[in-house]
Amino acid sequence: MDYPLKRTSQSGFTLVEMITTMAIMTLLMTLIFFNFRDAGKNKSARHQIANKLMADLRQAQSFALAGSPYLGDFMCGYGIHFSDKTVYVMYAKKPMSGSCAGINRNFDNGDPVVDTIIISNKNFEVIDPTGNKPADVFYEPPNPTIFIDNDPAIAEERYFISPVFKSVNCASAADAGECSALIISNGGTMQLLN
């Protein structure tokens, strides 16, 4: 009588192996999905902060172009000053002894504050290329002449919108994807990168 041959090895996967593999693949796909989703949110948040800052700089520039008085008084111009990396003010500069000649165009504690802006997204801050708070940008009528850190000869200022909780050097090309840069030139143009 012939008996069927017994198999000594089996090929294929068991149900437990297949379920384990599917669970691992699902976990990896979920992590990848949420990582890319958060990257898009971060870029959007950076751009929102940069656009608000750019709008405020444009408003200071417009006030200076128009020669707008503040609270009925003549002003020598308007500027943006960062009190720290997440709070900035738009300020007006009063003339000294009836003249704007020779004034310090950087923010002083006695200058009228037009508006105080707090960056509400605590995951980001605005820094200069060295990681410090940015320099003051001041617009003086009638052109308006732009003073960066009280100097009309500085060609440009770079504001970086950077993640707070990461060690990122926004000035380096390797970390450029983590930051957005707002470039303000002394010619009056502004450019948003990344």
Image (cartoon, grey):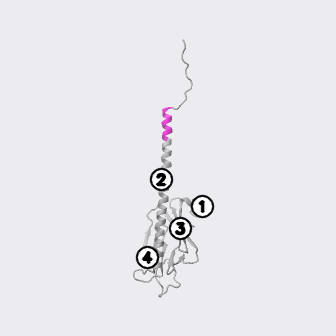
Precedes in sequence: disc 1 or disc 3: 1
Q: Residues within 10 Å of mark 4 (few under 14, many from 20)?
A: some
- Place of residue 96 in the rendered image (x, y in percent of width and height, measured from the top left): 48, 85
Report the Cα–Cα distance between label 1 and label 4.
36 Å
In the depicted structure, whether residue 123 falls above or below residue 17 = below
**Quick one: which residue is furthest to the top in this view?**
1
Report the Cα–Cα distance between label 2 and label 1.
23 Å
The residue type indicated by label 1 comes to: Ala
**Quick one: which residue is furthest to the left in this view?**
71
Which of the two marks, 2 or 4, is nearer to us in this view?
A: 2
Residue at image mark 3? 191
Which of the two marks, 1 or 4, is nearer to us in this view?
A: 1
State yes or no: discs 4 and 3 in contact (Cβ < 8 Å): no
Q: Residues within 10 Å of mark 3 (few under 14, many from 20)?
A: few
Query: For this view, does 140 lie left or right of residue 73?
Result: right
Q: Residue at x 47, y 66 (%)?
A: 51
The residue type indicated by label 3 comes to: Gln
Residue at image mark 1? 173
Residue at image mark 4? 113
Residue at image mark 2? 37
Q: Quadrant of the N terminus?
A: top right
- Place of residue 128 in the rendered image (x, y in percent of width and height, measured from the top left): 55, 68
Precedes in sequence: disc 4 or disc 3: 4
